[in-house]
Amino acid sequence: MCGPVLDPATVGDEIAELDLQPNDPPVFLMTIPPFSRNWTDRMESMGTIPATETLRTRLGEATDTKARRAIAWESSVQVAEEAEHAGCAGAILMGLKFETVVDEGALAWNRSSV
């Protein structure tokens, strides 16, 4: 496992650093939805891959909680898609309350192609 990643724009560079080879064991990328700028700062202080300023700006502009949550779920799905495109075996959703993962997260991820 590697990550965790908040921002889909950072996936390619992070996975490229692993220099995955065909005979390597499967790698799964962990992702945490970036629910707000403050949440992103908090997660980064605990070791996540830093988010881009573009994502931070989107979260700041979406002051409505519902809009920020939509951006967060969209970002986490995009991280998973980018992870598979970069050669990962898949993505692991983490850093959330159980209720959030099995309710809100499941609905958001089931609407996607992941």
Image (cartoon, rainbow, N blue to C red):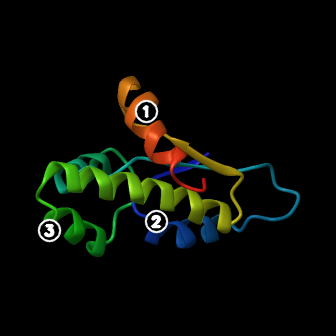
Q: How far is the residue under mark 2 from the one under mark 3?
A: 18 Å
Quadrant into which the N terminus falls = top right
Q: Is 20 displayed left or right of 7 in the figure?
A: right
Q: How far is the residue under mark 1 from the one under mark 2?
A: 19 Å
Q: Which of marks 1 and 3 is nearer the N terminus?
A: 3
Q: Where is residue 112 in the image (x, y as percent from the top left)?
A: 53, 54
Q: Where is residue 91 in the image (x, y as percent from the top left)?
A: 59, 48
Q: Is mark 1 on a helix, strand or loop?
A: helix
Residue in front for this viewpoint, 42 or 63: 63
Residue located farthest toward the left when viewing the structure as drawn: 63
Amino acid on which the number 2 mark rests in the picture: Pro
Residue located farthest toward the front when viewing the structure as drawn: 111
Residue in front for this viewpoint, 109 or 52: 109
Q: Nearer the viewer, mark 2 or mark 3?
A: 3
Q: How far is the residue under mark 1 from the one under mark 3?
A: 25 Å
Q: Residue at x 23, y 48 (%)?
A: 39
Q: Where is residue 37 in the image (x, y as percent from the top left)?
A: 19, 57
Amino acid on which the number 1 mark rests in the picture: Val
Tell me, yes or no, if residue 63 can be seen here: yes
Q: Where is residue 60 in the image (x, y as percent from the top left)?
A: 15, 64
Residue in front for this viewpoint, 102 or 15: 102
Residue 24, label in figure: none
- Labelled pair 1, 2 in contact (Cβ < 8 Å): no
Q: Mark 2 points at which residue?
A: 8
Q: Which of marks 1 and 2 is nearer the N terminus?
A: 2
Q: Residue at x 80, y 49 (%)?
A: 25
Residue 47 against residue 104 in the figure, above or below: below
Q: Is mark 3 on a helix, strand or loop?
A: helix
Q: Residue at x 49, y 62 (%)?
A: 78
Q: Mark 1 points at which residue?
A: 101
Q: Mark 3 points at which residue?
A: 61
